[in-house]
Amino acid sequence: MHRTAVRAAALVAPLLALTGCGSSPTPAHRDPVTIALTSSAFTDSGAIPARYTCSGSGTIPPLSWTNVPKDTAWLALYMEDTTAGDLTHWYTVEIPASTTGVTEGQKPQGHVVTGYLPPCPQSGTEDDYVFTVYALPKEYSPAKIGGVVSFDAPGLHAHAIGEGTLTGTFTRKL
């Protein structure tokens, strides 16, 4: 009976190793600390000024965040158009934990996966743009596919020790 259990374990262990994804084990469930993410250019759920969109110069808006957990190793910044089926507009990882925001037009330090794509909904429509900052522990590395960093919302959320969002809207005139 003992040999059967050992053989079964030897067969199952490699299969279990193959089922994992991402770069580190899934952490025990915990609620991430709420990070306050704000912009001096627009309020949460407010209109994003045209200069930060395709109707203007497409400049990166100023963003700032506070309440980042002390044990944060690095940050990720993500922007998506949730109206257009979660279209990625910006994704930067491995931002130093000491960073407290970005000034207007500034790219944060870190690894830019997707450069800033300004809001640009179809003419005559309003879209919602969600900026999210994630605080991540040193045990977690950005997900990679073939050596290229890819966006992994479930992985970021599952490993985040802090998270904050800011939503802006933009209506493109006809």
Image: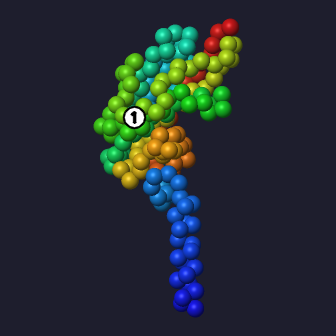
| Element marked by disc 1 | strand
Is residue 34 something one can see in this rendering? no
Name the one closer to the observer, 72 or 40.
72
Q: Position of residue 145 (x, y in %)?
A: 51, 44
Q: In this view, does 84 lie to the left or right of 159?
A: right
Residue drawn at 39 percent across, 25 percent down: 107
* Residue farthest along the front direction in this orientation: 146
Look at label 1 and name its amino acid.
His
Give the labeled residue for mark 1: 111
Residue at the image point whose x is 36% and y is 34% from the top:
110
| 10 Å crowding of disc 1: few (<14), some (14-19), many (20+) | some
Looking at the rendered image, the quarter that the C terminus falls into is top right
Above or below for 5 versus 84: below
- Quarter of the rendering occupied by the N terminus: bottom right
Q: Pinpoint residue 80: horizontal percent, then vertical percent.
A: 56, 30
Q: Residue at x 57, y 72 (%)?
A: 12
In which quadrant of the rendered view does residue 64 lie? top left
Q: Residue furthest top?
A: 174
53 relative to 165, above or below: above
